[in-house]
Amino acid sequence: MPKRSTPLGGQGTLTQRLRDVLRTRILSGDWRPGERISSETDLSEQYRVSRVTVRTALKSLESQGLLDIRHGSGAYVSNFGSSIRAGLQELRSITETIRELGFEPGMKFKSLQQVGANSEQAAHLNIEEGAPVLAMERAILADGEIVAYSYDAVAIAGLPSSVVQAIGKGSVFAALAKFGVYPARAFAEIHAINSTEIGWGSKRPSGALYLLLDQVHFDRDGNPLMHSKTYFVEGRFQFVILRTS
Amino acid sequence: MPKRSTPLGGQGTLTQRLRDVLRTRILSGDWRPGERISSETDLSEQYRVSRVTVRTALKSLESQGLLDIRHGSGAYVSNFGSSIRAGLQELRSITETIRELGFEPGMKFKSLQQVGANSEQAAHLNIEEGAPVLAMERAILADGEIVAYSYDAVAIAGLPSSVVQAIGKGSVFAALAKFGVYPARAFAEIHAINSTEIGWGSKRPSGALYLLLDQVHFDRDGNPLMHSKTYFVEGRFQFVILRTS
DNA sequence: AATTGAATAGTTGTCCTACAACTTTATAGG
DNA sequence: CCTATAAAGTTGTAGGACAACTATTCAATT
């Protein structure tokens, strides 16, 4: 078993940990866009892992659009590196995304209670109508400014009631993680919405134009965990997608 | 050099060819959603490739959301397999997407001419302001109904003038392909737009609400090829994204 | 009978070595 | 200066081995 100088902290498989380290290095600018990163052999020696592990990690970053690997030449930092952080295809907590973009995330609950699922929620979560769900209405803030309103419903079956308190204190993702629930995938639909019925409070934006992200989160096994309708105030959040063929 | 019974036709690396074959098998229902596919060793023997190649192909399909690989257990077909095809993250011609969704695609040009690049186009295409570009304004139809208005600019340097005629007859992608130009990636920004300034003609939709896909297409080497602002009429086109962690 | 626990076989994760295929750089010759 | 060739460097694939994890089987215990 090889020992490594930089212990590759974190969780997950060795490849995943290495991938995260390399992603951080790329995003932090260790290599400039268009520049060639170290060769697989070099990285293999540097982190004391096999070349197979390095290759798998690089391939993963390539499929995320951060790298462009060319046979016989090397792996080059893609020219989109800096903007991709807010990429839609990567499933991340909104709170964490806001923080990584350099803002101070915040959250204001309008409601947070256990209710019976309405027909839309029941259909998305694959449960009976009226079955208990944890419903919440939140305003999401960045540096004190409202960037989105979110209407969420968590399938509550099997979750201890203490999760309610945990959610009230911070990120939904972080709260669920404490109870062993990890969203692994989300299936999202995007719409443009123009309505004055959305949002509340005094800091409500003047416009009525929103980008709606209507998504269902699933766990590893494909079981629906949460239905979420998030209305992003147009102009205050930049959504980007890297499309590949 | 191993010989394989099924020759894995197509182009690209061995891994890419195997990946395409396996993706086709998955989408065609060789294994049902949730079902475990053959083990890496089995696939390795079946296609006469090394386990490394099989692993790389499977990992690629996992990052596309088609598979879920579990340590010590196997690779399972994800439950979204059938819906993903229309996903935003896959770069495809709008025309072809419309046809695959079962509609008859159409296109109406308002203009198609060589002009000097404006500042926005110049910035996105990384050329001088005023440099020649092929600009077009089009309405995109599905079954005769307008689903989007698109304002595009192709960096024309090096392209023969005959490409203009080819584009006028059908898909832009198809026309460019004839001249050896293949968009490999696109970087898209999404916005909600409410404006009456968009669109033209008698079949113009009554509403003024659009989903704007503002994207730049790049070739394999990262050179910008085309800037494209496409305004999709809200409600007439469904955009979905699979988000993974 | 039901539950627990250990052994077992099967599968993915990582390692090592080797070589093929491709790209870039260096070199020699004109 | 230009071209062709050689050399070095890099990614792609192969094969074998073992570790780590999962699912199953079956005997022992309650």
Image: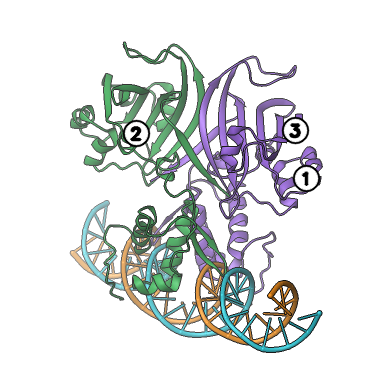
Chain colours: A purple, B green, C orange, D cyan
Q: Which residue is mark 1?
A: A163
Q: Nearer the viewer, residue B133 or B49?
A: B49
The correct choice, above or below, for B102 with respect to B244 in the image is: above
Numbered disc 3: secondary structure: strand
Numbered disc 2: secondary structure: helix
Give the alpha-carbon distance from disc 1 to disc 3, as whole Å.
19 Å
The correct choice, above or below, for A46 with respect to B64 in the image is: below
Judging from the image, mark 3 belongs to the subunit labelled: A
Judging from the image, mark 2 belongs to the subunit labelled: B
Among the two numbered marks 1 and 3 on one chain, the one whose residue lies closer to the N terminus: 3
In the image, residue A204 lies at what x, y percent? Answer: 69, 18
Image point (61%, 38%), residue name: A227
Give the alpha-carbon distance from disc 2 to disc 3, as whole Å.
38 Å
Q: Which residue is mark 3?
A: A106
Q: Is residue A53 left or right of residue B4?
A: right
The correct choice, above or below, for A96 with respect to B163 in the image is: below
Q: Is residue B214 left or right of residue A13?
A: left
Judging from the image, mark 1 belongs to the subunit labelled: A
Image point (62%, 51%), residue name: A24
Numbered disc 1: secondary structure: helix
On the question of residue A39 being in view, the answer is no
Classify the position of the N terminus of chain A by image quarter: bottom right
User: Dots 1 and 3: beta carbons under 8 Å?
Assistant: no
Kindly indicate whether the residues beneath marks 2 and 3 are on one polypeptide chain. no
Q: Amino acid at mark 3?
A: Gly
Q: Nearer the viewer, residue B221 or B217?
A: B217
Q: Amino acid at mark 2?
A: Ile
Q: Which residue is mark 2?
A: B94
Residue A102 is tagged as none
